Amino acid sequence: MNIGQAAAASGVSAKMVRHYESIGLIAPGQRTQSGYRQYSEREVHLLRFIRQARNLGFPLEQIRVLLSLWQDTGRASGDVKRLAASHIAELDERIRALSDMRNTLQTLADACSGDSRPDCPILQGLADGHGGQCAHHADAAHPASGD
């Protein structure tokens, strides 16, 4: 199948297929005499594997390791589990960071009256570098800003 068909069958864009080839994540597709890339079901299966790993948030270098583990029938499942556990810890950290960002923004939005006045605790918090983490301190310093 050609690159467009392989892309459609795997759920990975043709541009990403080319990118994965360029960084050596997958082997380049075989070329026809006219120069078109051709892919087998095996390559499509690899692309689906990569897509699923990307959907789970694995970075490309970890996907490279996962692919090598997947293709190594002598691998220890513990190696795979350690990689997954490490990624879970990274995801937990990102979730905490996103939660902090959300809470900070919520604090800033809650401090904003949203009326026609130009005072804006959201913009002030961003400008002051508080990011809302200290919004109650910002309100104390600028009591009129939330009114």
Image (cartoon, rainbow, N blue to C red):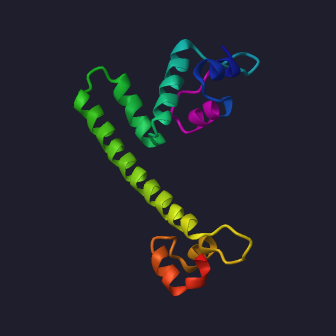
Residue depicted at x 48% and y 29% = 52
The quadrant in which residue 62 appears is top left
Q: In this view, does 142 lie to the left or right of 70?
A: right
Residue depicted at x 67% and y 17% = 5
Q: Position of residue 21 (x, y in %)?
A: 58, 32
- In the rendered image, the vertical position of residue 18 relative to residue 72, given as above or below: below
Q: Any magenta on residue 97? A: no
Q: Position of residue 88 (x, y in %)?
A: 34, 42
Q: In which quarter of the image is the N terminus?
A: top right
The quadrant in which residue 115 appears is bottom right
- Which is more toward the observer, 117 or 31? 117
Q: Position of residue 113 (x, y in %)?
A: 63, 69
Q: Any magenta on residue 23? A: yes
Residue depicted at x 61% and y 37% = 19
Q: In this view, does 118 lie to the left or right of 54?
A: right
The quadrant in which residue 2 appears is top right
Q: Where is residue 28 in the image (x, y as percent from the top left)?
A: 59, 27
Residue depicted at x 46% and y 80% = 137
What span is in magenta? 16-30
Farthest residue to the right: give it: 34
Q: In which quarter of the image is the C terminus?
A: bottom right
